[in-house]
Image (tube, helix red, strand yellow):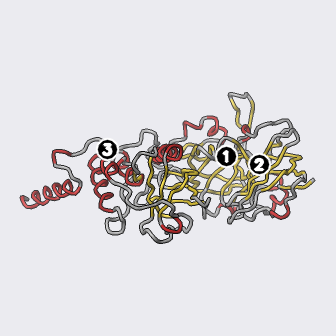
Amino acid sequence: MFKKTVGIFFLFLLSFTLIGCKPEEIPTEINTNYTDALKLEEDYENKSFLDYGIGEVTLTQVVDGDTAHFIDKNNRRITVRFLAINTPESTGRIEAWGKAASEFVKNILAEAKENGSIVLESEEIGKKAELDSTGGRYLAYVWYKLSPEADFRLLNLEIVEECYSKFTSDISSSKHGLVFNQAHLKSYEVQKRVYGEQDPNFDYSNTILEVTIAEIKNNFEAYDGGSRLKLEAQVMRLSGDNIYLQDVEQTFNEETKEYEKAGIYMFSGYGSGLGKLNVGAVITLQCQTVNNEIYGKQLTNPQNVRVVEHRDGFNVDVNLVPSNVTSLAEYEGYVVEIKNVKFISKSTPDDDGVYTIYGEMENKTKVNLRVDKTVYPKPDFSSIEVGAVYDVIGGVSKFHDGFQLMLANSKGYAVNDLVKK
């Protein structure tokens, strides 16, 4: 028994030797001492992250706590998965501390974009940046500074010290592995956030709440904490494997004093197979909600999807937008039809076939029609005639401070979503 006690005490002393603390200096509050001390030693000036493994970039979007989009000096888009960490989920599904981690990263990188700078660094400098196992995201350490005169800080490491993620790599395979491990051991002793605390804004219950889409949209904040929801809805349009859904039955809206069938967009991720569903089908499913700052209020993490009734996809109840409407905001989440849209111009498709049609309604209100990456098959770009007038059908989605019409998979029912007059 004596030997066992001595052994435990020795390990206890060793752990604090690694992180530079004495036993009586056990940390009880979060600090960022290791991030404060670590410096960016590599030269990044006039270098490219994609080509050389290090380079300055500009933020375009934070996806969650460990993924973000950037562009480099050559205007090349870069999706980055942060090295050595794995923050809780806040997009495809909702986990405790996921939204808080995402908000933390978003605030830092937004300020760095506005007032300082951001540099991406690979594990190996002098080589092309390495992709992750998905083949669509580059692996990087993200350095930032909040003003021109400030020192760069390693955001990945700071996320560990702020207890939003554990160190998920190992000392030998990570160029900064030793300091990450030291930060991890310290955060383990602090026992904050992902290291031991409950997220006050997350629903830990296993209760599944049966709701309508109208109820979700009218009381979104009540469910926006990871709550498990069950609903019945009709498939209105598909964008890849993602779905625009609408209530099957009308719900009374206390605010408008009218009965309504509410609509909402559901992000199912990539490879879920839900794109095989037929428009018109009535389904039941379990899901969660997410309020994305760029893309608006959505459903996410669909599970236990079951078709309970097949209906004709050509006769779904699409909302007709009146010709005097000047904003699509009130139609967010709905699939709508807009008649007599004049196509003013169209962007050149990118490498993924993504493009935008810029149109004008009868009352001169501008409306953008977006063909997204997920859409398959896509409407034929060459057949889109600038200067012509079309009747168009699509799902209304938020995009930053505006709203746009998202065109759907061009198959079956959707071949009539773009009809030239």
Residue 247 seen in this snapshot:
no
Q: Which residue is mark 2?
A: 368
Report helix, strand or loop for mark 1.
strand
Marks 1 and 3: in contact by CB < 8 Å?
Answer: no
Residue 383 seen in this snapshot:
yes
Marks 2 and 1: in contact by CB < 8 Å?
Answer: yes
Q: Which residue is mark 1?
A: 399
Judge left or right: residue 123 versus residue 294: left
- The quarter holding residue 71 reads bottom right
Q: Which mark is residue 198?
A: none
Amino acid identity at mark 2: Asn
Between 90 and 21, the one nearer to me in the picture: 21
Amino acid identity at mark 3: Asn
Mark 2–mark 3 Cα distance, whole angstroms, equals 46 Å
Q: Residues within 10 Å of mark 2 (few under 14, many from 20)?
A: some
Q: Which residue is mark 3?
A: 31
